[in-house]
Amino acid sequence: MPKDIVRHERRIQILEALHRCLLEKPFHQTTIKEIARKAGVNHGLLHYYFENKQDLLLKYIDYTFDNYYREFSDRFAQRPADGRSAAVPIEERFQWVLGEVAFNRDSARIFTEIWAMAMHNEAVRLKLHDLYAKWQRLIVDLLDDIGDGAEKASRISLSLIALTEGLSLFSVLYSRDDLCRHISFTRLMTCMEPPEDQQTDP
């Protein structure tokens, strides 16, 4: 097997091991030896693939977001070819984000801690900022399907990200039915429209 493939697979193996560790205890209590044990490798090998423990965490954040980006793009890259309105696939995408991102209990548990770390760790804060900016661009492209305009799409995308992250946090305490039994993209767009007396002519 080519060395590049082996290196890639070994890095994934270690990142997945960190994921399992973070489901059991906070990052600051997790040791390199514990991560190596979960990965089934010698702990000295981790320093060959990652500079230090923080570098491993930052690469884990990249890895997690990249998986979401990839699955989102793979599922929804194609525009509807069956005559349905654009609002139908948008609703499907929105519900996927709710199910796979906002109400993924494992991710919520881990990223609640990572968000807290970002308050005091500049490298983590910058990493999250950059990755959420990429997530925002994906949503802006999605909203472009319904022709809302770039400025409005940018505002809505930030609101949707804030909503899904807030729901993710509260999913630790409440069920999906408790939080958003009747939530839909269409209803949210209606709520985000300014009152008629505040709307301006184009």
Image (cartoon, helix red, strand yellow):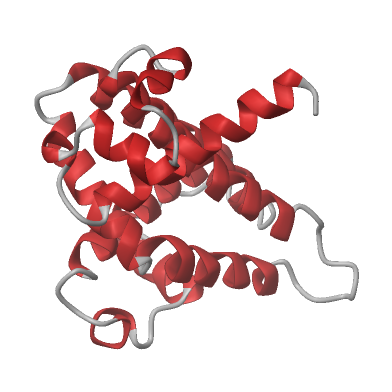
Q: Position of residue 171 (x, y in %)?
A: 24, 70
- Note whether 194 is above or below 89 in the view shown: above
Q: Position of residue 70 (x, y in %)?
A: 64, 46
Residue 92 in which image quadrant: bottom right
Residue at image coords 38%, 87%:
182
Q: Is residue 71 left or right of residue 59?
A: right
Q: Position of residue 66 (x, y in %)?
A: 55, 39
> In terms of depth relative to the viewer, which is nearer, 116 or 28?
28
> In terms of depth relative to the viewer, which is nearer, 39 or 55?
39
Quarter placement of the N terminus: top right
- Note whether 104 is above or below 110 in the view shown: below
Residue at image coords 63%, 28%:
8
Q: Is residue 58 left or right of residue 31?
A: right
Residue at image coords 39%, 55%:
160
Residue 48 in which image quadrant: top left
Q: Is residue 173 left or right of residue 154?
A: left
